Image (cartoon, rainbow, N blue to C red):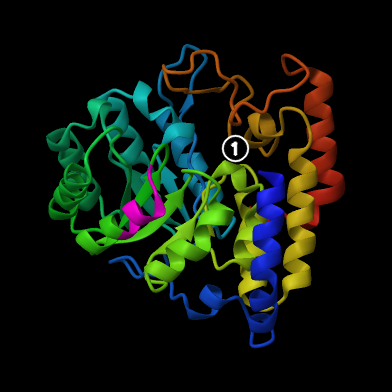
Amino acid sequence: MTANRRKFLQGTGASLGALAITGGGAFAAAGVATKSPNGKSLAGVFPIGWTPCKPDNSFDADAMVKQQQFLNRGKVAGMAWPQNASGWQSLSQAEWNAGAEALASVKGETALVLGVQTAGFNTAASQAYAKKAKSLNADGIISLVPPDASAADVASYFKALSDASGLPIMVQAVGNVSVNDLVALAAAVPAIVAVKDEAGDPLERAPDLLQKTGGRIEDFSGGGGMSFFAELELGFLGTCPYTGLADVLQACFNSYRAGRKRDAYDTFGRFLAFNSLPHANEYVMKARGVFAEDAVMRSNPAAPGAPAGGGRRRGGQITEAHKAEIRLALNTYLKPFLVA
């Protein structure tokens, strides 16, 4: 995979370098960010929100409000909730509604994109969530692609979501979803404006996806934002990381789009250095005072006991020494870059 990626980047490097003279990569220059019905840009950093809970694992609506307020203070473009990192499969209908209402109650510039997939990808149940998103004045909706479904059934599912909400749609692609599948889906459902591409290597898939959709579809990725700078070089218009350093990544995005690529590169380097610390994603929202020390992050039942932060746990259980190291890094190396 490393050799393939190196070959791919070498092959595209010349064209990207030539286009950089005129102010950006091929698709970065041509790509235009979609606006939500509320006039908010659907490009930039859209972290996947946590689902914060009390120590007994009961949903904490107040903490959810604090999370959205944190992103507003950080001038982060948006938030998507609930998706895989939010433990969406564990949420009851009442918890989903409580979380959506808590997020929608926060007024600010951070766009809200609500995840509407449901257990078994029941179309009627997902439509109910999509209608709720519309009633809450959300900026868009997002859904995973139903697994093991035909192209026709996938298109029918997303058309139903569009009909129910009238909102822009982001598709989260995982598993066996090809670029051609996404191109056909976007053509069949005009409301689809962006793809969070986690099916295969997004760096390798991006040029094909952007070219075949004429740059109409915004390319986002996940993976904690760990390859975001390379993605920006290829024309990505956003990323869906975790929330804890979303303001730092947003500053990186803003600098890059303004032509200050060296500043963007340096900011991204600090983001990566922080995330090299054990338990960084797991603890940063607590270290920054957003969540309580005893807060629990909900995880999907498919991965019981999975650590918060996308399975990046190293060194066993988090200790007071780990927490101190994370706070030290925030205060010593990142403080001038923290917006929230």
Disc 1: which residue = 290
Report the span colored magenta: 177-183
Above or below, 320 against 216 in this view is: above
**Residue at 47 percent of width and 23 percent of height:** 298
- In the image: residue 200, left or right of residue 307: left
Q: Nearer the viewer, residue 136 or 269?
A: 269
**Residue at 52 percent of width and 51 percent of height:** 221
Q: Nearer the viewer, residue 235 or 49?
A: 235
Residue 68 lies, in percent from the top left, at: 48, 46
**Residue at 62 percent of width and 78 percent of height:** 24
Above or below, 337 against 314 in this view is: below
On the rendered image, what quadrant is the N terminus found in? Answer: top right
Residue 134 lies, in percent from the top left, at: 21, 52
Count neighbours of disc 1 (C-alpha within 10 A) and say few if under 14, some if 14 to 19, many if 20 or more.
some
- In the image: residue 154, left or right of residue 99: left
- Magenta span: predominant SS is helix
- Report the number of numbered marks: 1
Say which quarter of the image contains residue 203: bottom right
Residue 318 lies, in percent from the top left, at: 73, 18
Q: Which of 289 and 306 is in front in this view?
A: 306
Residue 259 lies, in percent from the top left, at: 68, 79
The amino acid type, in three-letter code, at marker 1 is Val
Residue 242 appears anywhere in the view: no
